[in-house]
Image (cartoon, helix red, strand yellow):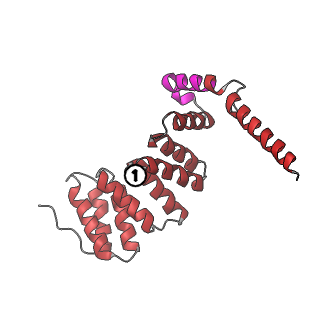
Amino acid sequence: MKPVNIIILGSCLALGAAGYFMIGKPGMADQPMAERQAELIERVRTDPESLTEAEMLSRLEQAVIDKPEDPQPHYFIGEILRTKGRTEDAVRAYQSALRRDQDFVPALVGLADVLTQLSEGAIGPDATRLYARAYELDETQVSAGMRAAMGAAQAGEQEKAEQAMRYIYSRLPEDDPRRERFRPMIEAIGQAPPEAE
């Protein structure tokens, strides 16, 4: 291809991309993106249940542009992509959220869940680390703490897994029904926790 043809092709692609962003996105009504986003903002405020998945993604993509340092839009994009079975894209979205806030608990858990899903249920070292960090930051994330302990057990670190399980167990309220689920897990890893007095 001659240099002049490359320049013409590049110019056409640039003009096409500019037109795409001015006019909107496929599947949406023909109107400028700014107008479309204003309409979506109003619907988010008044009737969020009426938004389609494509509209939610469009709104989140605009939020990424409007608030480039906010991890939340990236996290929610990851959640939508994950439900659509686009796990690799979901991984990238969660990672984008964590680049903006490395301690954003929902993205830590979301990324760990997807990594576990990609490894067919095995909780690998990266997922274990993410779950453990989520629980360390927020002890209400009991499921994340439990999965971190399970990851340690799968890696052959039985003592570490048992200590983690015992710690989580000890932090649960006495009337928490999860205590009964934890007992067999701790027994499987090590000894049963002592009876509550």
Can you see residue 153?
yes
* Residue name at image x 52 percent, y 46 percent: 79
Helix, strand or loop at disc 1?
loop
Q: Which residues are magenta?
A: 36-50
Magenta residue check for 46: yes
Image location of residue 163, percent across then percent down: 25, 69
Lateral position of residue 17 relative to residue 137, left or right: right
Looking at the picture, how far across and down is residue 57, in whole percent? Answer: 58, 38
Q: Is residue 145 above or below residue 94?
A: below
Instruction: Reply above or below: 38 against 4.
Output: above
Q: Residue at x 53, y 55 (%)?
A: 91
Q: Amino acid at mark 1?
A: Gln
The answer to whether residue 187 shows anywhere in this view is: no
Residue nearer the viewer, 134 or 1: 1
Q: Which residue is mark 1?
A: 102
Task: State the residue in front, 175 or 124.
Answer: 124
| Residue found farthest to the front | 3
- Residue at 80 percent across and 39 percent down: it is 12
Foreground: 1 or 101? 1
Badge 1 density bin: few <14, some 14–19, many ≥20, Cα 10 Å: some
Q: Nearer the viewer, residue 10 or 57?
A: 10
In this picture, residue 85 sits left or right of residue 197: right
115 to the left or right of 129: right
Residue furthest to the bottom: 156
Pinpoint residue 45: horizontal percent, then vertical percent. Answer: 49, 24
Relative to 81, say whether 156 is above or below: below
